Image (spheres, grey):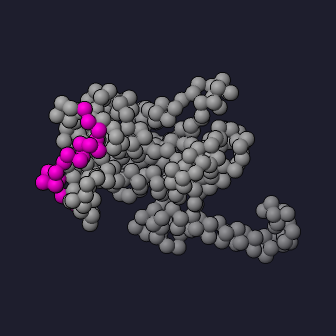
Amino acid sequence: MSISSISNALIGFRETHRPVDNVLIDRSGQFIEDVGSFWDHAEQRFKIAHGHLIANYVCTSGKHYPLEFRRFVKKQQCLEQTAKFQDHNVLFRQLIDWVVKNGIPGDFTFDRWFTHGENLNHINSKGRGYVADLKFNRKVVFDGKLIKANELAGQIGQDDRKPVVIGEHKQWFFTKSIRIEAVDHKLKIVMLWDKHKDAEPVKIFVTNRTFWEVGRILRVYRRRWRGTECFHRDGKQHLGMGDCQLRSGRGQTRHMHMVLLAHSVLMRQLRQNRAREWALERLTTIGQSCWAVLRETLSQTISWAIDRIQVDGWNCERIKVQLALS
């Protein structure tokens, strides 16, 4: 399935988003090309892994597709391979360019690790919008003064906070136009508190879509979880994202492309009005789709083996040889 076919199939949706995020894929061997020791913030430990940046496609329909990825290679490894080192932000901008070049519509969302001037300017120069998480200690220009974002939040009184309801969850926000040093375009900041009287906000966002209302900004950012974390989970649990132990980088890249393709094909089958011809039930999750494919494959294999015995007179040993089981 080509990227253009996915884009054309989904371009009719009113809102589409391009979450970009990084993921660590565990490896069991230190001799695999580009593998390295990375700190896992979720597990609070170092692990041997590949670090990937992945661009995704998220639709208001609930479907999400991985589009393209870049594998991060540590600086020391690049020196040993006489290759040019590219940090996470360079790879991030490469994915932005890839999405724009392929004409895939939508606004970008990403976490605080990629929220700095060069990345924000790059997206804005492409005529694209973004909603990004902001570090609490990031300095912003507010009313002509340079101040940390969390210190600014501490100056916002309860009377200046307004309620917003997303789904069934009520939170409190403050929004204002600001500037950030090294950012060459207008920005809107959104500070979000869980409770009206909370001292610290739970999140701080910035966006170049200064005309958007707060509810839309929050909905766009929250879809980032669906496009990144859901794919990371499904890829690792059901599609073998971390199962390839080939030493060559080319083999690892091909395996990753197959995982992306498998996820996209299965996602196309979800939430249909009726069950697919090969499925016994309406499919709603990637895990459910994987089990349906497994059941269908096993059923067809058993039927083929029975036909070989009854119709062609094969013995069991020949069938095992044909299935590479002997």
Percent position (x, y) of residue 272? Answer: 42, 64
Name above or below for residue 62 compared with residue 38.
below
* Residue projecting furthest to the bottom: 310
Name above or below for residue 134 compared with residue 166.
above
Indicate left or right for 266 with 209 as reference. Answer: right
Q: Quadrant of residue 163?
A: bottom left
Residue pictured at 19% horizontal, 42% vertical: 176
Magenta stretch bounds: 146-166
Percent position (x, y) of residue 216? Answer: 25, 51
Q: Is residue 197 visible?
A: yes
Residue pictured at 20% horizontal, 35% vertical: 142
Q: Is residue 126 visible?
A: no
Indicate left or right for 249 with 3 as reference. Answer: right
Name above or below for residue 186 compared with residue 272.
above
Q: Nearer the viewer, residue 32 or 261?
A: 32
Residue pictured at 67% horizontal, 69% vertical: 298
For residue 148: magenta? yes
For residue 268: magenta? no
